[in-house]
Amino acid sequence: MYRIVKRKPLNPTVTLLEVEAPLVAKKAKPGQFIILRVDEKGERIPLTIADSNKEAGTVTIIFQVVGGTTEKLNHVKQGGYIADFVGPLGRATEIEGLKKVAVVGGGVGSAIAYPVAKALHEAGAEVHAIVGFRTKDLVILEDEFRQNSSRFVLMSDDGSTGEKGLVTDALKKLIDSGEQYDEVITIGPLVMMKFVSLLTKQYGIKTVASMNPVMIDGTGMCGGCRLSVGGKTKFACVDGPEFDAHEIDFDEAIERSSMYHAFERHRHEETCNLFLGEDR
């Protein structure tokens, strides 16, 4: 059992949990993820490691409530326990040799982009962070990004905070102004990463995308997280989660991810009704 030592809502649908998991914290690196089960009968879900503290033995995860399991996880109170917390899994972000990087995050994907930006900043790289949200009420980790980047650009679809527009608008503006990046790292919705990739390909800028498809075992055995990268089948859990964005078949990944939306909505509704029944 793993104790939740801190619980903090970041916006109406996104929550931060700090989990006591010393063995995971000891080896965790930016870009890696864990797989958890809320209880012994629960499903396994992957969540990226947002931060870790080796001294305290804690790992921070940030998740958005979209299905039954995340709804159930969101009801575990501070001081409560979750059944399984396995990791770190996946390959860590490769930051060695990078001097100037644009980190582009969107929505809850910004929680994954943040530890990458932080690691690059601590390694001495110049980090330009571009993060986008639909509206002001959904913004997360703004202060943390500002502290760990040389330049920070906040975008919103409706213009309620930062600059109005898409993250690709901000990235293009920076590139056209003369900024030269060793690499662009993009993390967020698949459609966003696709268009970031299309943009940077025009400029010949190496780009890495962090993929988070449905996973079950996290060891490459089930094949649920398969992707097409450079015309070959790759598994996000063991080959990734980060890949050369210019080689990812985003259209295939988007089509596969959409297969589960109806099921997620159904399970979310079932779980909400279950908790409503317990509260009566």
Image: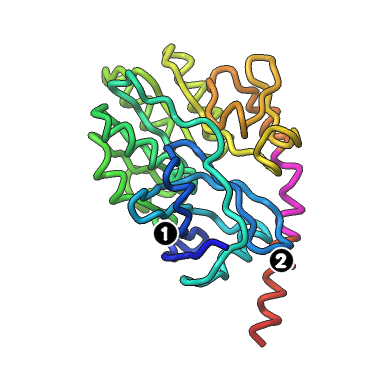
Rendered-image quadrant of the C terminus: bottom right
Question: On the rendered structure, is 173 left or right of 236?
Answer: left
Give SS at disc 1.
helix
Question: On the rendered structure, is 1 left or right of 261?
Answer: left
Question: On the rendered structure, is 26 left or right of 218?
Answer: left
Residue lying at the far top in this picture: please name it. 204
| Measured Cα–Cα span from mark 1 to mark 2 | 23 Å
Bounds of the magenta span? 257-266
Amino acid on which disc 2 is placed: Glu
Number of other residues with Cα within 10 Å of mark 1, as a class: few under 14, some 14 to 19, many 20 or more: few
| Mark earlier in primary sequence (1, 2) | 1
What residue is pinned by disc 1?
137
Q: Residue at x 29, y 31 (%)?
A: 127
Q: Is residue 157 visible?
A: no
Rendered-image quadrant of the N terminus: bottom right
| Callout 1–callout 2 Cβ contact below 8 Å | no
Q: Is residue 228 visible?
A: yes
Amino acid on which disc 1 is placed: Asp
The spot of residue 223 in percent (x, y) is 74, 33
What residue is pinned by disc 2?
269
Residue 261 falls inside the magenta stretch: yes
